[in-house]
Amino acid sequence: MENKIQHINPNELIKNPAFSQIITTEGNGKTIYIGGQNAVNGNGEIVGKNDVLQQTEQVMKNLN
């Protein structure tokens, strides 16, 4: 079985040619790799400086 690799970079997240936000691989099973996420909004601005709850909420929004 041939492995299938898909790079996913949602428009709402920061673009960087050095990495992908999400990579999925499919072969005998499916694996999803999620890049390290930061508490930044779509404009690249830090959200919730010094507030771990706001930062966590933003990270979860970025993953959604």
Image (tube, rainbow, N blue to C red):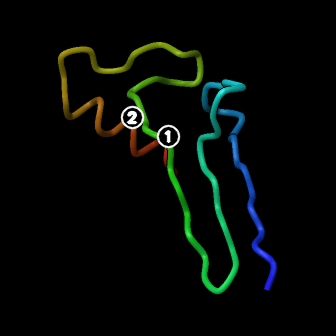
Q: Badge 2 local density, few (<14 within 10 Å), some, or many (20+)?
A: many
| Residue type, numbered disc 1 | Asn
Q: Is residue 59 left or right of residue 45?
A: left
Question: Residue 46 or 8: which is nearer the viewer?
Answer: 8
Quarter assignment of residue 43: top right
Location of the N terminus by quadrant is bottom right
- Of all residues, the one furthest to the right in this rendering is 2
Q: Badge 1 local density, few (<14 within 10 Å), some, or many (20+)?
A: some
Quarter assignment of residue 49: top left
Q: Which mark is residue 62?
A: 1
Element type where label 2 sits in the image = helix
**Residue at horizontal 49 percent and vertical 47 percent from the top:** 63
**Residue at horizontal 66 percent and vertical 67 percent from the top:** 25
Question: Residue 13 or 4: which is nearer the viewer?
Answer: 4
**Residue at horizontal 50 percent and vertical 24 percent from the top:** 41
Q: Position of residue 52 (x, y in %)?
A: 19, 30
Q: Is residue 59 left or right of residue 55?
A: right
Q: Which residue is mark 2?
A: 58
**Residue at horizontal 77 percent and vertical 69 percent from the top:** 4
- Check the image and report above or below for 55 versus 9: above
- Check the image and report above or below for 3 versus 9: below
**Separation of disc 2 and disc 1 at Cα?**
6 Å
Question: Residue 48 or 33: which is nearer the viewer?
Answer: 33
Q: Is residue 52 left or right of residue 20?
A: left
Q: Which mark is residue 22?
A: none
Q: Position of residue 61 (x, y in %)?
A: 46, 42
Element type where label 1 sits in the image = helix
Q: Position of residue 54 (x, y in %)?
A: 27, 30
Determine whether label 2 and label 1 are within 8 Å by CB. yes
| Mark count | 2
Q: Position of residue 31 (x, y in %)?
A: 56, 70
| Residue type, numbered disc 2 | Gln
